[in-house]
Image: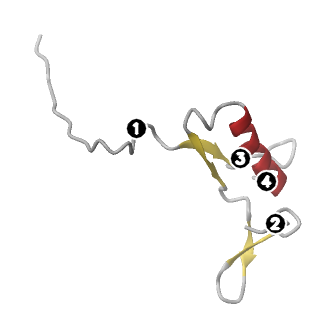
């Protein structure tokens, strides 16, 4: 049997030691049939607090990503807007 050896070079700067890890709003369900994505400020903040409380943050889970459920539309300049009922503190 033969072995294939490869030399890998990298910077010793602490970056890229783990893949990006976190929680994402994708397919958070707003109905029993889970037919569309839905998230709100309470859900997002609750997920972030739970990640911190259960040790996931210390284990490297550093991201809370909002997928496609937050955008409400665009204003006259083309800038995304959000549903202020679901995200009362803004984005």
Tag 3's secondary structure?
loop
Q: Dot 2, crowdedness within 10 Å: few (<14), some or many (≥20)?
A: few
The earlier-in-sequence mark between 2 and 3 is 3
**CA distance separating discs 2 and 3:** 23 Å
x and y percentages locating residue 18 in the rendered image: 44, 37
The residue lying toward the viewer, choosing from 23 and 27, is 23
Q: Are marks 3 and 4 in contact (CB under 8 Å)?
A: no
The earlier-in-sequence mark between 1 and 4 is 1
The residue lying toward the viewer, choosing from 54 and 28, is 54
Q: Is residue 64 left or right of residue 49?
A: left
Report which residue position mark 2 lands on: 89
Q: Nearer the viewer, mark 1 or mark 4?
A: 1
Q: Residue furthest bottom?
A: 76
Report which residue position mark 1 lands on: 17
Q: Is residue 4 left or right of residue 57?
A: left
x and y percentages locating residue 27 in the rendered image: 71, 46
**CA distance separating discs 1 and 3:** 28 Å
**CA distance separating discs 3 and 4:** 7 Å
Report which residue position mark 4 lands on: 38
């Amino acid at each position: 049997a033969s072995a294939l050896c490869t030399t890998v070079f990298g910077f010793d700067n602490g970056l890229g030691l783990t893949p990006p890890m976190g929680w994402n709003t994708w397919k958070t369900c707003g109905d029993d049939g889970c037919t569309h994505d839905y998230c709100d400020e309470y859900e997002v903040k609750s997920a972030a607090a739970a990640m911190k409380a259960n040790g996931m943050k210390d284990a490297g889970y550093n991201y809370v990503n909002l997928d496609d459920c937050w955008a409400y539309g665009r204003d006259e300049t083309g800038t995304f807007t959000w549903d202020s009922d679901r995200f009362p503190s803004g984005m």
